[in-house]
Image: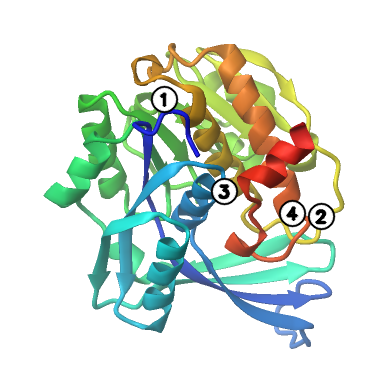
């Protein structure tokens, strides 16, 4: 577990049940084809990142919404089993969100998300604001309405909480929104959409302008790390044979934040306070965690524990 137990991680994000079908390839329009396997796995980018962080030793609280249905109860049970605080997970009448995932034999995937209960999170309760204000890190994605994310950032900035955003799926964001985040972690496609820069190095420079950290993930090519408009380097990926890339990015982010939380003192949580050395160390840790996850099927089911990553880096 963390050396600094005061460094709690609040995750404001989506909770879905993933409905996963494996198939040889994606069907053509109008085509019916046979799949080879079907599974139901807890997911959602928010829940994925919360589980990844908890398995890497993070002290995590989850903020979001699920329906009063079987999927919602199963997701609550998972959070409890992972030791993640779920008192701020609201129950609503809308059905729990679902993600419909096709995984082809190469390991690549395509995903259709039906937001369900996640779409009801348009503001924060007083209790949820309190959870964020007492955290050291706030982790967010774009599977919740932007109003909720903006509210979370406002509370975080008022209380010196380090903010992390995965801008996926890419959506229209208010002016200055990205600049108000301490760390943004898009993949190369998302980075290009956000900046108009096809070169991920240039995109990282743009996203990191103004004392912001940016990490642009490149899949099997590793990731680009930048701060304050300057690229610090390309961190290589760990070579593995991919089985399923679902939640690889979420595993990366959860492990990254957990690693930062494990060796960062509360007074060092500003963007400039997390040094290049510490960020690169966390990226290295997250890269290994992500590489392990793609060798297994599923989202949360594929995420490694702390000991597994430590063994690779020993």
The Cα atoms of the two marked residues, 2 and 1, are separated by 31 Å
Spot occupied by residue 156 in the image (x, y as percentages of width and height):
27, 32
Looking at marks 2 and 3 on the same chain, the residue that comes earlier in the sequence is marked by 2
Residue found 46% across the figure and 67% down from its top: 78
Looking at marks 1 and 3 on the same chain, the residue that comes earlier in the sequence is marked by 1
Spot occupied by residue 55 in the image (x, y as percentages of width and height):
55, 49
Q: Residues within 10 Å of mark 2 (few under 14, many from 20)?
A: some
- Label 3: element kind: helix
Looking at marks 3 and 4 on the same chain, the residue that comes earlier in the sequence is marked by 3
Disc 4 to disc 2: CB gap under 8 Å: yes
Q: Which mark is residue 250?
A: 3
Residue 155 horizontal side relative to residue 113, left or right: left
How many numbered dots are placed on residues in this image? Answer: 4
Q: Residues within 10 Å of mark 1 (few under 14, many from 20)?
A: many
Mark 4 = which residue?
294
Spot occupied by residue 295 in the image (x, y as percentages of width and height):
78, 56
Mark 2 = which residue?
242
């Amino acid at each position: 577990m963390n050396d600094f137990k005061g460094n709690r991680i609040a995750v404001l994000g989506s909770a879905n049940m993933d409905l996963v079908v494996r198939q040889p390839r994606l069907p053509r329009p109008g085509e019916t084809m046979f799949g080879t396997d079907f599974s139901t796995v807890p997911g959602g980018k928010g829940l994925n990142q919360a589980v990844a962080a908890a398995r890497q030793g993070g002290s995590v609280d989850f903020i979001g919404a699920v329906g009063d249905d079987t999927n919602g109860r199963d997701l609550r049970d998972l959070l409890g089993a992972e030791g993640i605080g779920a008192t701020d997970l609201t129950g609503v009448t809308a059905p729990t969100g679902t993600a419909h995932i096709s995984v082809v034999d190469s390991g690549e995937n395509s995903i259709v998300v039906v937001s369900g209960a996640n779409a009801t999170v348009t503001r924060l309760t007083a209790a949820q604001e309190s959870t964020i204000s007492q955290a050291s890190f706030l982790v967010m994605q774009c599977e919740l309405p932007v109003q909720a994310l903006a509210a979370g950032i406002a509370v975080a900035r008022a209380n010196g909480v380090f903010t992390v955003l995965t801008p996926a799926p890419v959506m229209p964001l208010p002016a200055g929104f990205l600049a108000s985040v301490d760390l943004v972690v898009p993949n190369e496609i998302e980075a290009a959409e956000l900046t108009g820069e096809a070169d991920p190095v240039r995109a990282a420079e743009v996203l990191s302008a103004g004392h912001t950290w940016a990490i642009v993930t490149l899949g099997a090519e590793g990731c680009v790390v930048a701060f304050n408009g300057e690229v610090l380097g390309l961190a290589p990926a760990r070579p593995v044979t991919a089985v399923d890339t679902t939640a690889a990015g979420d595993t990366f982010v959860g492990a990254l934040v957990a690693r930062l939380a494990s060796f960062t003192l509360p007074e060092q949580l500003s963007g400039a306070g997390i040094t290049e050395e510490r960020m690169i160390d966390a990226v290295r840790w997250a890269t290994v965690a992500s590489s392990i996850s793609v060798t297994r099927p599923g989202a949360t089911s594929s995420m490694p524990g702390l000991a597994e990553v430590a063994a690779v880096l020993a």
